[in-house]
Image: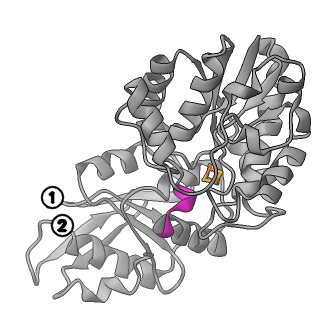
């Protein structure tokens, strides 16, 4: 018997897999890459967690479908930030269900816990997610199974319902105790990986979609550096350190020019193409201000297609109001 698990990387999804693996069911952990989960930094973590409990890891790239099907028009709305959790879970189950045949698996599981999140994991919400999965009877939540209607896996005896749990509510005491018992350490905090639950990232995303059409390659640019929206609408992203600079250097979005100060050390910058002359001038001053530069001296800032002269501002206070925070 095999099952596919929605695997977020969080403790609940790990424990839900463990409960099923303990019943001698093979589990393939499906990590859905929506583009908002900081996947690049986490693959080795995800693999380590799967190795620990004995599940196989598969990464399912659904970035394009996520933008098209979920992010902008979630039927069941957003959580506190830009997180459309109910639609998102339904979407993940729906697409994971399409892999059941490939893996010769019979049902799906997730780490959802009844009552853990007031909006997206109450009884109604879990029912809606099941409907959105288009495979209602194949969705099992091992951590709260005893509090939920029976699913096919239990009815058919594929899993022993008695060995599943009845966890309810926001406390994670039982899960932490379970983790301790099996020696599981260094797991991520809840929703640790999803940027859509982060206030600052959500503000950046809101600003972006108010000014432009979001494409997949834009998502990574929203994760890096200081982000500013200048008065005539141009977007400016300034690296804060070497790591940011390297990430910005590696981007290949057609929307931006890469810029640097000439003859001085300074940040790498992405700057929107087709900016007004006033925004170009302001960007040059801001870039010079974040460089190792001297007051009163005029520097050339190379934007690739053109060069603009800039001067260090007396104070960075003038920059603050353009920061997207
Ligand atoms: S926290 Fe993010 S990944 Fe998780 S269900 Fe919500 S939107 Fe989807």
User: Ligand 1 closer than 8 Å to the CB at disc 2?
Assistant: no
Image coordinates of residue 302 in percent, x first then y, are 31, 61
Image coordinates of residue 158 in percent, x first then y, are 81, 16
What secondary structure is found at the residue carrying circle 1? loop
Q: Is residue 159 above or below residue 83?
A: above
User: In this picture, which residue range is highlighted in magenta?
Assistant: 195-199
Q: Is residue 54 visible?
A: yes
Tell me if 249 is positioned left or right of 153 in this view: left
Residue drawn at x 80%, y 44% as measured from the top left: 148
**Neighbourhood count class around disc 2 (C-alpha, 10 Å): few under 14, some 14–19, many 20 upward:** some
Please give the residue where the numbered disc 2 appears in the rendered image.
291
What secondary structure is found at the residue carrying circle 2? loop
Marks 1 and 2, the one that precedes in the sequence = 1
Q: Work out which quarter of the rendered image holds the N terminus and state it.
A: top right
Q: Image quarter for residue 140?
A: top right
Tell me if 43 is positioned left or right of 114 in this view: left
In this orientation, which residue lies closer to the viewer: 229 or 75?
75
Q: CA distance from mark 1 to mark 2?
A: 6 Å
On whether residue 192 falls in the magenta region, the answer is no
Work out which residue is located at the far left of the displayed protein and give it. 294
Image coordinates of residue 262 in percent, x first then y, are 21, 60
Q: Is residue 59 visible?
A: no
Please give the residue where the numbered disc 1 appears in the rendered image.
265
The reply to whether callout 1 and callout 2 are in contact (CB within 8 Å) is yes
């Amino acid at each position: 018997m095999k099952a596919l698990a929605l695997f977020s990387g969080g403790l609940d999804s790990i424990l839900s897999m463990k409960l099923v693996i303990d019943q001698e069911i093979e589990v393939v952990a499906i990590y859905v890459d929506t583009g908002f989960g900081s996947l690049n930094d986490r693959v080795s973590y995800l693999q380590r967690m799967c190795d620990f409990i004995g599940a196989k890891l598969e990464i399912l790239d659904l970035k394009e479908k996520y933008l098209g099907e979920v992010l902008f028009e979630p039927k069941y709305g957003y959580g506190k930030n830009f997180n459309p959790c109910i639609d998102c879970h339904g979407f993940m189950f729906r697409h994971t269900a399409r892999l059941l045949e490939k893996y010769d698996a019979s049902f799906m599981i997730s780490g959802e816990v009844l009552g853990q999140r007031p909006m997206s994991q109450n009884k109604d919400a879990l029912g809606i997610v099941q409907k959105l999965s288009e495979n209602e009877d194949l969705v099992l939540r091992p951590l709260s199974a005893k509090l939920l209607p029976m699913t096919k896996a239990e009815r058919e005896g594929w899993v022993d319902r008695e060995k599943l749990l009845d966890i309810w509510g926001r406390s994670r005491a039982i899960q932490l105790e379970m983790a301790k018992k099996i020696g599981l350490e260094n797991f991520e905090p809840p929703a640790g990986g999803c940027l859509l639950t982060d206030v600052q990232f959500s503000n950046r995303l809101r600003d972006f979609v108010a000014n432009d059409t979001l494409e997949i390659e834009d998502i990574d640019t929203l994760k890096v550096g200081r982000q500013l929206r200048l008065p005539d609408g141009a977007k400016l992203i300034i690296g804060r350190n070497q790591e940011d600079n390297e990430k910005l250097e590696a981007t290949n979005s057609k929307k931006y020019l890469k810029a640097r100060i000439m003859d001085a050390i300074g940040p790498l910058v992405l700057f929107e193409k087709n900016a007004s002359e006033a925004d170009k001038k302001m960007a040059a001053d801001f870039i010079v201000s974040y460089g190792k530069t001297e007051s009163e001296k005029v520097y050339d800032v190379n934007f690739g297609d053109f060069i603009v002269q800039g001067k260090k501002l007396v104070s960075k206070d003038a920059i603050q109001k353009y920061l997207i925070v």
